[in-house]
Image (cartoon, rainbow, N blue to C red):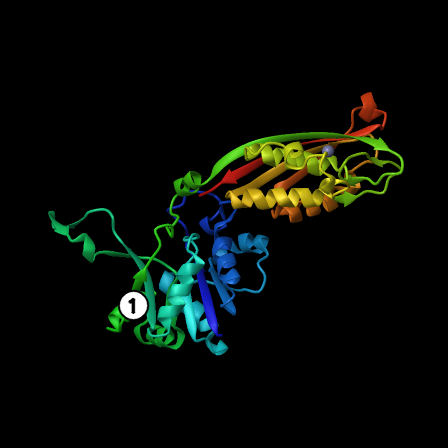
């Protein structure tokens, strides 16, 4: 296996009006660029992934902390960027290379499989779809019809034999806009395969807005504090002379979050899902219950956008445990710690919480539904 996946993310994104450059904008809950990186990595057939970025975007790529990829700066044009990427792996003995545009986050593993299959007998394989719109040609104010059947809209990833493509790049230079065009110019065979309708190019803010549908959920929970019990808050064991009473481990933070998520996804509440009449859930860790809910919402195409949490206690003070709790929740919910916020509150010594007889928590969650 010596396959390389090159992701082009070096453009200026002029058509994309936003302060954050397009590859780093959130799309379906994560930065656009990461969709392609993760998909290539999860496919497990690429031993080299190269990302070509714009050198003005250094601070954005740093924040993503992507591991085990080669990051290089692009050139002035798409072709120049592709050439630089190919040159950067010159010594790696690459056999097959795919070149992909970071603006297309929705390609499937099935498409990669078909590209690899055709690459066995071809040196250039391009996915393309036929136009569903009728097409006209305008030349010198004269408008004529073009047969729709003859028009192909090309997509990425495009797959190549590495040495052939690199040779053509060197011979024909970088004025050619597209890698497949090198093969056209050199009059070499291009194999077209069926592209994917879903594999669209994200061009304007509207694409992202249409694809994201935000919903909100709220959760609340309270547990008695009693002696001889453990205290878990947000999945973290807190050293304290009292612990919470509950059928499960009595973690009010994870229970409030679980309820908030279920609420946002219109899936009922934690009591319905995990009844305290069910012996199976006696003393169960709430981390397990929340993980189950996360799996269920993932299957329904929901992603968590952010969680905000109020933990209401007189004692213990949660200030020192915040980071630990955030990290624990981020792992269970499969989101970044930056998507979670915790606030420690007291009730000014008033009521059951103020008298240290109970701990309460409220949480609000926003989630995104995508197709
Ligand atoms: Zn509870």
Q: Which residue is mark 1?
A: 191
Give the vertical position of 226 relative to 23 (above or below).
above
Picture coordinates of residue 262, whole percent (x, y):
59, 35
Tell which of 334 and 267 is nearer to you.
Answer: 267
The number of numbered badges drawn on the structure is 1
Inspect this view and state whether residue 234 appears: no
Quarter of the image for residue 227 reads top right
Q: State the SS at label 1.
A: strand
Rendered view: 201 above or below 45: above
> Is residue 264 at least partly visible in the picture?
yes
Q: Residue, x 29% and y 68% (percent of image)?
A: 191
Residue drawn at (67%, 42%), measured in percent from left and top?
289
Q: State left or right for residue 116 relative to residue 312.
A: left
> Is 274 on the left-hand or right-hand side of 16?
right
Please say if 193 is above or below 16.
below
* Position of residue 112 measured from the top left corner of the image (x, y, whole percent): 42, 63
């Amino acid at each position: 296996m010596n396959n390389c996946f090159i992701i082009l993310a070096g453009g200026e994104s002029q058509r994309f009006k936003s302060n954050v450059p397009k590859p780093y904008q959130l799309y379906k809950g994560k930065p656009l660029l990461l969709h392609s990186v993760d998909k290539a990595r999860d496919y497990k057939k690429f031993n080299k992934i190269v990302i070509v970025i714009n050198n003005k975007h250094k601070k954005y790529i740093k924040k993503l902390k992507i591991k085990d990829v080669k990051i290089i700066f692009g050139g002035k044009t798409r072709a120049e960027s592709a050439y630089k990427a190919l040159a950067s792996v010159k010594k790696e003995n690459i056999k097959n290379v795919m070149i992909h545009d970071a603006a297309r986050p929705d390609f499937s593993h099935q498409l990669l499989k078909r590209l690899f299959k055709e690459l066995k007998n071809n040196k250039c394989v391009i996915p393309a779809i036929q136009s569903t719109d009728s097409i006209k040609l305008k030349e010198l104010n004269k408008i004529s019809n073009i047969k729709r059947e003859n028009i192909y809209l090309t997509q990425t990833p495009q797959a190549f034999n590495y040495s052939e493509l690199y040779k053509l790049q060197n011979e024909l230079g970088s004025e050619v806009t597209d890698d497949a065009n090198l093969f056209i110019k050199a009059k070499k065979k291009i194999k077209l395969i069926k592209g994917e309708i879903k594999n669209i190019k994200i061009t304007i803010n509207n694409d992202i807005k249409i694809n994201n549908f935000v919903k909100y959920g709220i959760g609340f929970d309270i547990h008695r504090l009693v002696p001889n019990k453990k205290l878990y808050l947000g999945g973290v064991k807190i050293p304290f002379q009292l612990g919470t009473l509950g059928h499960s481990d009595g973690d009010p933070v994870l229970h409030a979050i679980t309820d908030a998520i279920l609420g946002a996804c219109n899936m009922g509440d934690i009591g319905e899902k995990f009844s305290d009449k069910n012996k199976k859930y006696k003393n169960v860790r709430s981390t397990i219950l929340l993980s189950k809910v996360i799996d269920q919402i993932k299957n329904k195409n929901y992603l968590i956008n952010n969680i905000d949490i109020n933990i209401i206690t007189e004692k213990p003070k949660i200030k020192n445990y915040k980071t630990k709790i955030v990290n624990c929740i981020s792992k269970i919910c499969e989101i970044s710690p930056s998507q979670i916020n915790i606030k420690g509150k007291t009730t000014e010594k008033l009521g059951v919480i103020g008298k240290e007889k109970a701990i309460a928590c409220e949480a609000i969650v926003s989630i995104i539904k995508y197709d």
